[in-house]
């Protein structure tokens, strides 16, 4: 990587950092707390053998989570890092469509 490419990468990183500072971190924290609560509910449903209900709970929560403005902004910011290590791999890994592909109780 030459100096010009390095400077371009640093400028892109600065843009991403500026973007990330605008994200409502209290909303991210609230989403994390909801996710923890949902995880406990799903675990209980799985323990009771209610796999379909557990999957539906995950899908419903994922759809709601995807509409969270702070997470949408976080995704937009992470897209600025195209070609660099993804910041939000979980957002891609846990897309709503992916939940139909496996049993949420074994993941």
Image: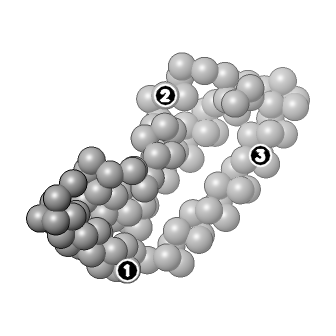
Q: Is residue 31 above or below residue 64?
A: below
Q: Measure the C-alpha gap from mark 3 to mark 2.
A: 20 Å
Q: Residue at x 71, y 56 (%)?
A: 36
Q: Mark 2 or mark 1: which is in front?
A: 1
Q: Which mark is residue 33?
A: none
Residue 82 as seen in the image, left or right of residue 66? left
Disc nearer the start of the sequence (3/2): 3
**Helix or strand or loop: what does disc 3 sit on?**
helix
Q: Which mark is residue 98?
A: 2
Figure quadrant of residue 95: top left
Q: Measure the C-alpha gap from mark 2 to mark 1.
A: 30 Å
Q: Measure the C-alpha gap from mark 1 to mark 3.
A: 32 Å
Q: Residue at x 84, y 24 (%)?
A: 49
Report the quarter where the C terminus lies: top right
Figure quadrant of residue 51: top right
Residue that label 3 marks: 41
Q: Residue at x 51, y 46 (%)?
A: 90
Disc nearer the start of the sequence (1/3): 1
Residue lying farthest front? 2
């Amino acid at each position: 990587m030459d100096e010009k490419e390095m400077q371009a990468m640093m400028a892109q990183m600065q843009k991403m950092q500026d973007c990330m500072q605008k994200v409502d971190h209290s909303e991210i924290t609230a989403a994390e707390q909801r996710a923890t609560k949902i995880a406990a509910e799903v675990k209980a449903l799985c323990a009771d053998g209610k796999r379909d209900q557990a999957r539906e709970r995950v899908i419903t929560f994922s759809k709601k989570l995807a509409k969270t403005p702070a997470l949408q902004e976080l995704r937009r910011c992470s897209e600025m890092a195209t070609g660099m290590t993804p910041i939000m791999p979980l957002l891609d890994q846990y897309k709503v469509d992916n939940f139909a592909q496996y049993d949420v109780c074994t993941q």
